[in-house]
């Protein structure tokens, strides 16, 4: 059974600081997704990582995937208040499981002024 | 393009009642899915469909039924609501299996 662990679960950071959210998963996978959710809202796709070594960047967020270590990171550079949200990683279980996604529990990020 | 739409936005049911949550997409996506989100947890897959007429179970299918008679619509039926089904339900779609999923706005369901 695929397990997906995110840490930290809660993160308060000061504006302007850098931080990294980690997503570890327990079985082989070649695809990983990052989503953002604002309170009471739906999920918004941030990044799709499709291969080992994939790196994607958008604004102050950068995501990477290491399939050998079964680890993805979401790095936040010079945080701003607008980045406050909950961030989820979701791991693709592969074609044998109809590519179902298993989600992590989420990291609730609060950026303080 | 409306994307993925869901109705209703909020619903309160009594234990034992049945209801259908509606989901529709206008992107001609083959793959559609239903998730539930409970506090402090990520999303869990209930049922999914890889095309019209084809559905399959996800991680937590008990107490729910689905059908897919058209590409656009994927309703989720609660047969006999239980308090354990109190949750936020999200519908999602993607072009095909293994592609990025787009989520609807969600339905907040409370079962008393």
Image (tube, rainbow, N blue to C red):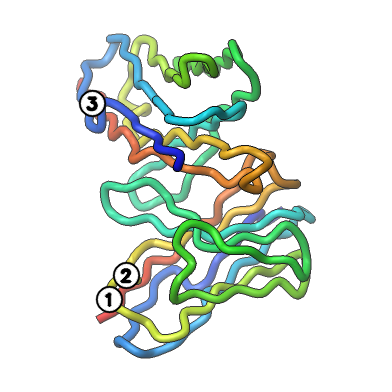
Above or below B51: residue A55: above
Is A26 on the left or on the right of A15, as rendered? right
Query: In whole angstroms, how far apart are the C-alphas of marks 2 and 1?
Result: 6 Å
Residue B63 or A1: which is nearer the viewer?
Answer: A1
Above or below B34: residue B40: above
Q: Residue at x 65, y 69 (%)?
A: B74
Subunit of label 1: B
Residue B82 or A109: which is nearer the viewer?
Answer: B82
Q: Mark 2: which secondary structure?
A: loop
Residue linked to disc 1: B83
Q: Nearer the viewer, mark 3 or mark 2?
A: 2
Q: Are marks 2 and 1 on the same chain?
A: yes
Q: Residue at x 50, y 62 (%)?
A: B46
Q: Residue at x 48, y 45 (%)?
A: A43
Is A59 on the left or on the right of A79, as rendered? right
Mark 1 crowd level (few <14, some 14–19, many ≥20, 10 Å Cα): some
Q: Are marks 3 and 1 on the same chain?
A: no
Are discs 2 and 1 less than 8 Å apart at CB?
A: yes
């Amino acid at each position: 059974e695929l397990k997906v662990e995110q840490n930290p679960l809660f993160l308060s950071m000061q504006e302007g600081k850098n931080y990294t959210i980690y997503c570890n998963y327990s079985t082989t996978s070649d695809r990983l997704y990052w989503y953002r959710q604002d309170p009471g809202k739906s999920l918004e796709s941030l990044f799709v990582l499709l291969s080992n070594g994939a790196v994607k960047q958008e604004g102050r967020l950068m995501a990477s995937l290491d399939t050998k270590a079964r680890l993805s990171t979401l790095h936040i550079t010079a945080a701003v208040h607008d980045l406050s949200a909950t961030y989820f990683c979701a791991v693709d279980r592969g074609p044998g499981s109809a590519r179902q996604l298993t989600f992590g529990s989420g990291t609730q990020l609060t950026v303080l002024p | 393009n409306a994307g993925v739409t869901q109705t209703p936005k909020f619903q309160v049911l009594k234990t034992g009642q049945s209801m259908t949550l509606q989901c529709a997409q206008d992107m001609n996506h083959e793959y559609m899915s239903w998730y539930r989100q409970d506090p402090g947890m990520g999303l869990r897959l209930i049922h999914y469909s890889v095309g019209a007429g084809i559905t399959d179970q996800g991680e937590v299918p008990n107490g729910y039924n689905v059908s897919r008679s058209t590409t656009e619509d994927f309703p989720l039926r609660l047969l006999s609501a239980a308090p354990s089904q109190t949750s936020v339900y999200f519908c999602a779609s993607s072009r095909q299996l293994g592609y990025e999923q787009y989520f609807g706005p969600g339905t907040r369901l409370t079962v008393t």
